[in-house]
Amino acid sequence: MRELHDFPGGLSLLPHKEITNREMSIVQPLPERLFLPLQQHIGQPATPVVSTGERVLKGQIIARADGYVSVPVHASTSGVITDIGLYPVPHPTISTAPCMVLEPDGNDAWFDIWPSERYDHLEPVRLQELIRDCGIVGLGGAGFPAHVKLMEGVENAVDTLIINGVECEPHITCDDRLIQEKASYVVSGARMIRHAVQARHCVIALEDDMELAYQALAGLVDDDLELVKVPTRYPAGGENQLIKTLTGKDVPSAGLPIHIGIVIHNVATAAAVYRAVTRGEPIVSRYVTVTGKVDNPVNLQVLLGTPVEDCLATCGYQRCEENKVIIGGPMMGVHVTTPNMPVIKTTNCIIIEENTPAQPEMPCIRCGNCADVCPERLLPQQLYWFARAQALEQARAYRLFDCTECGCCAYTCPSHIPLVDYYRRAKSQITLDQEHSRGAEHLRQRFIRKNARLQHDARAARADKPLRDGGSDQDSRSAKKSYVQAALARSRAQRQQRSVADGKAR
């Protein structure tokens, strides 16, 4: 038995998971149009490689990765690209983003895809490339490109690979259902990822209330995998918190799990890796929990790009202005005013809640509740003051970017201060300032390089001029002296000739 450790802070929340975790998932019908954002992950957005009016096949790359921390976007079905433009997206700080609009033709015809040979015969680098080319990212919510973690794992010694099946937010059961229905995908995918990073140990972690999922996996794991239950407590599924629970280690501030020899991936990511390796399938769909004030709460298997409102209609929801839509969980999800936006790679849940008036924000009373529940041992009150005052350097010094935006602080705040909103805005402003600074530095370097090039060209021109004029400076001076002497000699000769001529005339 693996020894488990406690992490600081956290909350005990009512799970509300029995509503959807015991019902079989349903395949979401094909929509009239799919909206595929060019950025569905952390990192650089993809770049379109097809044009408006072009026909595409399911699984075909329609936007290529742009840089190392980026992944391609694939067509979710066959059809025609009807537009490339700005459309609503589920994002905490922006409302619209570049999307490719795909009108399905109803054939669902696949692009040419090929399974790989036995994964254990493949070089780890080949597995990483395959996972990158299939557009796989972390499907637990963060959306970090999976291949980057794998490449970092190969470049560093990996002691433990953790496959994260801990769904700690209330209502969300998409991973639970995936495990119950596709347990063999998860186990096989875990083994493939382990081979890709050459990890010494591999642990699949679930919450202790996911009994059916645990039973589905228990019959498939062997001595090469550990299956572990962790206590149900929010945010036990957070990357740093799960690492602490399973290993007792702390991820260093501003660091990554790989810095302490650990790589962590979601169970849905493992299942996607299995599909990519054994079938050559890129990620074009995912499980999504639809719950709350809907007639038929259930988990759906949804093509990426499907409008959220289509998923809600499948669950019997009639749009009502008195309700609000949450994309994600109740703690970390994005509250949106309209379901007119697509399901993307990181969409794990859609919740309909009654649109109750927000409690007015009151002054901070310095109660300290926020610090007590912070799982990252931060000082949320200080971060709030700095973020509110736009004292961004101080906020950064107080480890603003170590905040995982779990929402524990805002949940316990008696003054109803939307603390996470302040932190998000501060992070966005710092990132924007850094981009502007990088842009200014880039222009400065270009100016310096241009001046250096002009000075070099001027020096070269000065060095070449004497040669063009007939030699070195000394040769040039000699030539000028000879020219003057010859001119004087000619002048004297002409005067002598005139004198002789005058004498003869007399």
Image (tube, rainbow, N blue to C red):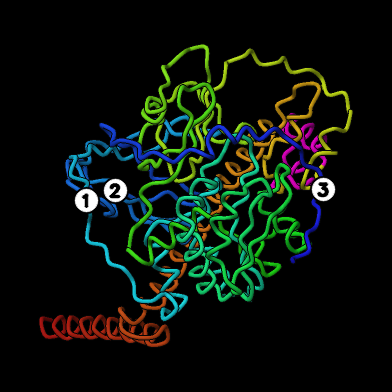
In what quadrant of the picture does the N terminus appear? bottom right
Q: Position of residue 498 (x, y in %)?
A: 17, 80
The magenta segment is 379-401
Image point (59%, 35%), residue name: 18
Secondary structure of the residue carrying tag 3 is: loop
Q: Are marks 1 and 2 in contact (CB under 8 Å)?
A: yes
Q: Quick check: 318 above or below 88?
A: above
- Near mark 2 (Cα within 10 A), the count class, few <14, some 14-19 or many ≥20, is many
Image point (27%, 67%), residue name: 114
Q: Position of residue 83 (x, y in %)?
A: 25, 36
Task: Measure the C-alpha gap from mark 3 to mark 1.
Answer: 49 Å
Residue designated by label 2? 75
From this viewpoint, which residue is outermost toward the left?
A: 505
Query: Residue flagged by tag 3: what amino acid is it?
Result: Pro
Query: Residue flagged by tag 1: what amino acid is it?
Result: Leu
Q: Quick check: 280 above or below 211?
A: below
Upstream in sequence: badge 1 or badge 2: 1
Query: Residue flagged by tag 2: what amino acid is it?
Result: Ala
Tag on residue 57?
1
Q: Position of residue 48 (x, y in %)?
A: 30, 49
